[in-house]
Amino acid sequence: MFHHLFRRNKTPQARFAPTLFLILITVFVIVMRARPVLGLAGLGTTLLVVAGLVIVNRDRIWDNYKKSYKKTKGWRGRFTELNKTYYYINVVLLWPFIAALGLVCLCAAYAYKN
């Protein structure tokens, strides 16, 4: 009866972050049509923040993916299997490219302003 008072549940992970970043990217793309400098600066900043967060937390993301993959039942997809190659593609190619794209957006906003 009193054991519920002393149990500490883990707080759930934030699931709003991916949706928030997609909404921000969409908003800045729409804003870019009316005010290009503001749209490019916002898009560049958002892309840099997303890429930075993913690169910094890459090991934790990979560990969570491994744990969730082991819990899946039924047929597992060939492209979702645990393979270090996909990890390296994401860490070495995809997210640094997105960060570079963010820098290009910021440079384009600065050049457009001047």
Image (cartoon, rainbow, N blue to C red):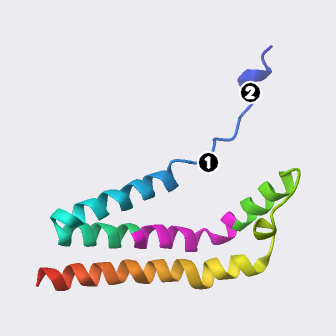
Whether tag 2 and tag 1 are in contact, CB under 8 A, the answer is: no
Quarter of image, res 41: bottom left
Q: Label 1 crowding class (10 Å Cα cut-off): few <14, some 14-19, many 20+? A: few
The prevailing secondary structure element of the residues shown in magenta is helix
- Residue at image position (81%, 69%) is 78
Q: Position of residue 12 (x, y in %)?
A: 63, 42
Q: Is residue 16 above or below residue 112?
A: above
Q: Earlier in the sequence, mark 2 or mark 1?
A: 2
From mark 2 to mark 1, how far is it between C-alphas? Answer: 21 Å
Q: Label 2 crowding class (10 Å Cα cut-off): few <14, some 14-19, many 20+? A: few
- The secondary structure type at the circle numbered 1 is loop
The residue to which callout 2 is attached is: 6
Left or right: residue 69 versus residue 18 is right
Q: Position of residue 92 (x, y in %)?
A: 61, 85
Q: Type of residue at label 2?
A: Phe
Q: Position of residue 61 (x, y in %)?
A: 67, 64
Q: Quadrant where the N terminus lies?
A: top right
The residue to which callout 1 is attached is: 13
Quarter of image, res 21: bottom left
The region drawn magenta spans 47-61
Is 34 magenta? The answer is: no
Q: Position of residue 73 (x, y in %)?
A: 87, 50
- Residue at image position (56%, 69%) is 54
**40 or 12: which is nearer to us?**
40
Left or right: residue 24 versus residue 12 is left
Left or right: residue 77 versus residue 58 is right
Q: Type of residue at label 1?
A: Gln
Quarter of image, res 69: bottom right
- The secondary structure type at the circle numbered 2 is helix
